[in-house]
Image: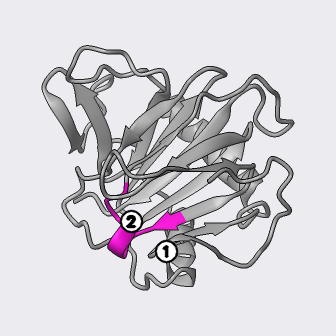
Amino acid sequence: MTWDLFEARDPAPLVLAPGAWLRRGRVLAEAESILALVALVAAEAPFRRMETPGGFTMSAAMTSCGRAGWLTDRSGYRYGPLDPLSGRPWPPLPAWLSALAAGLAAECGYPGFAPDSCLINRYEPGARMAPHQDKDERDLTAPIVSLSFGISARFLFGGAHRSDPTQKILLHHGDVVVWGGPSRLFFHGIGAVPKGHHPAVGAMRLNLTFRKAL
């Protein structure tokens, strides 16, 4: 299934799969504050392109904030309390941003979400994320809350198996996707980000995903 490039935005939740929801433009009003926070996080914990256990360098650059940051290198995928570039704790996840993510989760049927980690991905044109499962978190009963900003890109949302059919959903600046419950371990990724420019972000896409990691 491919969502139309010019699909109208709808403030009501759109069901992607059991337990998975899309909110068009849901955080447009908060975008300026969120992007300012991303700049502060990146100043303290710079974006970096990490290496996978197989020795490949990821095309998306990453950083984190919260009690733990997501890491990958030759030793595997994991969460850690310290930024390996500085040896210091990751920048804190502000209470207002944690509360925003919790509220978005509650709107989609997941009350009580208390994220302790926010992974921030930066996609420049051509960068992508291969379909994968988010399964490094200790609490898989908690949902994933994902916020998109900047250049529009195709979100690939599959099923419980890598071979399941994949939806291709164009995500725009300010869109939110929340998934959990029966779709918590569905495969998902991002298609190659096209060339473009967004007045608030520039020639890139930024994605924040909130998780209960510890």
In the displayed structure image, the side of residue 144 where residue 78 appears, left or right: left
Q: Earlier in the sequence, mark 2 or mark 1?
A: 1
Q: Secondary structure at mark 2?
A: loop
Q: Residue 186 in the image: x percent, y percent?
A: 37, 57
Residue 143's x, y, as percent? Answer: 39, 68
184 inside magenta stretch: yes
Residue at x 44% of width, y 22% of height: 48
Which quarter of the figure has residue 175?
bottom right
At x 49% / y 50%, what residue is drawn? 166
Task: Indicate the colouring scheme.
Answer: one colour
Q: Quadrant of the N terminus?
A: bottom right
Few, some or many C-alpha atoms within 10 Å of disc 1 (few <14, some 14-19, many ≥20)?
Answer: many
Q: Looking at the rendering, which quadrant does residue 159 occupy? A: bottom left
Question: In the displayed structure, would residue 144 be above or below residue 87?
Answer: below
**Quadrant in which the C terminus appears:** bottom left
Q: Residue at x 61, y 20 (%)?
A: 126
Q: Is residue 88 visible?
A: no
The answer to whether residue 149 is left or right of residue 69 is right
Q: Which mark is residue 102?
A: 1
Contact between labelled residues 1 and 2, with CB atoms less than 8 Å apart: yes
Q: CA distance from mark 2 to mark 1?
A: 7 Å
Q: Where's residue 157, x and y in %?
A: 49, 52
Q: Answer left or right for 214 relative to 109.
A: left
Q: Nearer the viewer, residue 177 or 154?
A: 154
Q: What amino acid type should be assigned to the residue bearing mark 2?
A: Pro
Which span of residues is magenta-colored?
Answer: 178-186
Quadrant of the rendered structure where residue 36 is? top right
Q: Nearer the viewer, residue 58 or 30?
A: 58
> Looking at the image, is 54 positioned above or below residue 144?
above
Instruction: Give, as a three-letter code, the residue at label 1.
Output: Ala
In this figure, which residue is indicated by the disc labeled 2?
115
Q: Could you tell me which secondary element the residue under label 1 belongs to?
A: helix
